[in-house]
Image: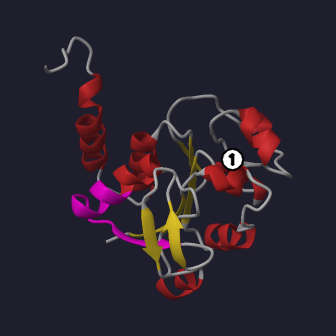
C-alpha cells in the first residue's frame, strides 16, 4: 500500500484533493495522512475546518511515497510558508512530489520545476508568484496534469488527472488508473443528456 502525505494550508482548495483522497483511500488502497506547517485547525476556501495534528516531522517518521501540495489562496501571499527544504528533501529521497494550482508555486520556489516539464494555471502565474522560478522553457500549457522526473503538476481545474498521475507514479495498475478516469469523466461524454 502506497503512503501519501497531503499538505493542507489555511485557505486550501476544497476540490483539489477530494478525488485523490476520497477515492484513492476508499477504493484504490492508498494510505493517506495529512500534514500542515503548523499543526492544528486549517480552514478551506469553502469554510470546512479540518483538524490536522501532524506537521512536517511526520514525513521523517512515516516516510511517505508521495507528498501532495494542495493549492489555495495562501500560496500567492507574501506570508506563504517556505517549504522548499521539505520538498527538496522528499524529492532527493525519490518520493513523488506533486502540486496542484497554488501548490505548484511551492514547487517552483523550491526549484523543482526548473528542469522538468510541468504545468500550472499559467506560466505567468508561476513567474509572478514564485520568486526564483526559472523553468518557463519547460512549461507545458495544457488543461491536465503532467508528470516528469518524479514531479507532478496540475492546474486547479484538473483534480481528476492530478489524482490519476499520482496513482500512476505510485505504480497503481494501469487498469486502475484508467478506471478512475473513466468513472469520473463519464459525465462529460458527448451526446449525453442531463437528467431532469
Q: Nearer the viewer, residue 44 or 171?
A: 44
Q: Residue at x 78, y 46 (%)?
A: 129
Q: Nearer the viewer, residue 97 or 192?
A: 192
Q: Residue at x 66, y 67 (%)?
A: 87
Q: In this rendering, is residue 75 above or below 39?
A: above
Q: Is residue 72 left or right of residue 17?
A: right
| In the image, farthest residue toward the bottom | 61
On whether residue 65 falls in the magenta region, the answer is: no
Report the label total: 1
* Residue 135 visible in the current orientation: no
On whether residue 33 falls in the magenta region, the answer is: yes
Query: What's the magenta region?
Result: 21-35
Task: Give how far across and how far down residue 171 sits, in percent.
Answer: 38, 58
Q: In this rendering, is residue 55 above or below 20?
A: below
Q: Is residue 15 left or right of residue 26?
A: right
Would you call the spot at circle 1 few (<14 residues within 10 Å), some (14-19), or many (20 or more)? some
Task: Give how far across and how far down residue 50 sits, in percent.
Answer: 43, 68
**Which quarter of the picture shows residue 94?**
bottom right
Q: Nearer the viewer, residue 111 or 120?
A: 120
Q: Residue at x 13, y 19 (%)?
A: 196
Amino acid at each position: 500500500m502506497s503512503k501519501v502525505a497531503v499538505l493542507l494550508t489555511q485557505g486550501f482548495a476544497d476540490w483539489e484533493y477530494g478525488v485523490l483522497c476520497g477515492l484513492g483511500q476508499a477504493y484504490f488502497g492508498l494510505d493517506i495522512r495529512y500534514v500542515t506547517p503548523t499543526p492544528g485547525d486549517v480552514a478551506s476556501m469553502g469554510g470546512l475546518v479540518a483538524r490536522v495534528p501532524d506537521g512536517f516531522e511526520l514525513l521523517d517518521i512515516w516516510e511517505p511515497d508521495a507528498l501532495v501540495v494542495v493549492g489555495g489562496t495562501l500560496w500567492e501571499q507574501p506570508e506563504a510558508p517556505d517549504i522548499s527544504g521539505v520538498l527538496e528533501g522528499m524529492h532527493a529521497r525519490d518520493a513523488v512530489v506533486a502540486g496542484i494550482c497554488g501548490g505548484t508555486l511551492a514547487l517552483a520556489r523550491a526549484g523543482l520545476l526548473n528542469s522538468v516539464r510541468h504545468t500550472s494555471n499559467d506560466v505567468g502565474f508561476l513567474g509572478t508568484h514564485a520568486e526564483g522560478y526559472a523553468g518557463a522553457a519547460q512549461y507545458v500549457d495544457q488543461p491536465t496534469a503532467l508528470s516528469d522526473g518524479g514531479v507532478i503538476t496540475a492546474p486547479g481545474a484538473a483534480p481528476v488527472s492530478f489524482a490519476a498521475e499520482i496513482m500512476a507514479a505510485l505504480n497503481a495498475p494501469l487498469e486502475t488508473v484508467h478506471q478512475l478516469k473513466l468513472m469520473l469523466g463519464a459525465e462529460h461524454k458527448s451526446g449525453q443528456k442531463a437528467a431532469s
